[in-house]
Image (cartoon, grey):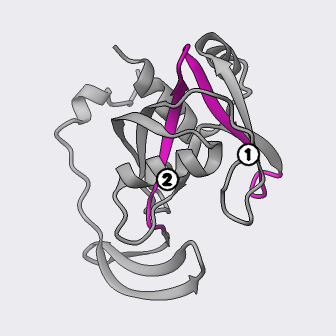
Amino acid sequence: MSNAVSPSANHNLKPLPEHTISSRLAFSGRLLKVEVLDVELEPGVRATREIIRHPGAVAVIAECPGKRFVLVRQFRKATEQALLEIVAGGLEPNESPENCARREVLEETGHEVITLRRLGSIYPTPGYNSEIIHLFHANVSAGRATHHKGDHDERICVEYFSRQEVETLIRQGAIPDAKTLSAWLLFSMP
């Protein structure tokens, strides 16, 4: 006999909030900050949490006329490999997600956003990271990108795929990026 509780039986259980007793800034960089928090889970039960504070980001499924999708390939040092992803970038201070999405598509691909539709938002790693990524689908201008005006430290290759090609790459595991997979799932839902 299994002791597992079915997901439907858990819906009334609410985890208690953790009370922060103290916090200290362990690191502050250009992109993020790391805080170490001492928390109380319940009276007498304490734990330490290490939290990455991130300003948030956007990720955009960019679709050209003729149902061609624009993806970018770039080397990601954290994974030590080049990954194929949808267009993405961090929010600037006081920038709306919509404006950020338009800016990032233009900077990374050279395409202009014609229409923009919000797909949703995700917390990619909420166990230790405050980052929220706002997901969009954009219809973009025609043509092929010949260059991008991304950040000075970005090296991006712009690539074009049909919907079937993107979905084949996903099934084959050739696109392991979480924001791309999440956005594509939301985009594909009826």
Res. 100 mark: none
Dot 1, how many residues are within 10 Å of its Cα: few (below 14), some (14-19), or many (20+)? few
- Disc 2 versus disc 1: distance between alpha carbons? 15 Å
Q: To which residue does mark 1 refer?
A: 147
The quarter of the picture where the N terminus appears is: top left
Residue 181 drawn above or below residue 103: above
Q: Is 66 one of the magenta-colored residues?
A: yes
Q: Which residues are magenta?
A: 54-80
Residue in the picture at 63% in, 42% down: 109
Give the prevailing secondary structure in the magenta stretch: strand
The quarter of the picture where the C terminus appears is: top left
Q: Nearer the viewer, residue 68 or 18?
A: 68
Q: Secondary structure at mark 1?
A: loop
Residue in the picture at 50% in, 27% down: 184
Q: Is 90 one of the magenta-colored residues?
A: no
Q: To which residue does mark 2 refer?
A: 103
Residue 109 drawn above or below residue 131: above
Q: Amino acid at mark 2?
A: Arg
Residue in the picture at 41% in, 27% down: 186
Dot placed on the residue nearer the N-terminal end, 2 or 1:
2
Residue 118 image position (x, y, % from top left) = 33, 37
Residue 9 image position (x, y, % from top left) = 23, 30
Mark whose residue sits in front, 2 or 1: 1
Drawn side of residue 171 relative to residue 121, left or right: right
Q: Nearer the viewer, residue 31 or 14?
A: 31
Drawn side of residue 5 relative to residue 181, left or right: left
Q: Amino acid at mark 1?
A: His
Question: Please, which residue is most extreme toward the left here?
Answer: 12
Q: Nearer the viewer, residue 125 or 167?
A: 167
**Which of the 4 quarters of the picture holds residue 172?**
top right
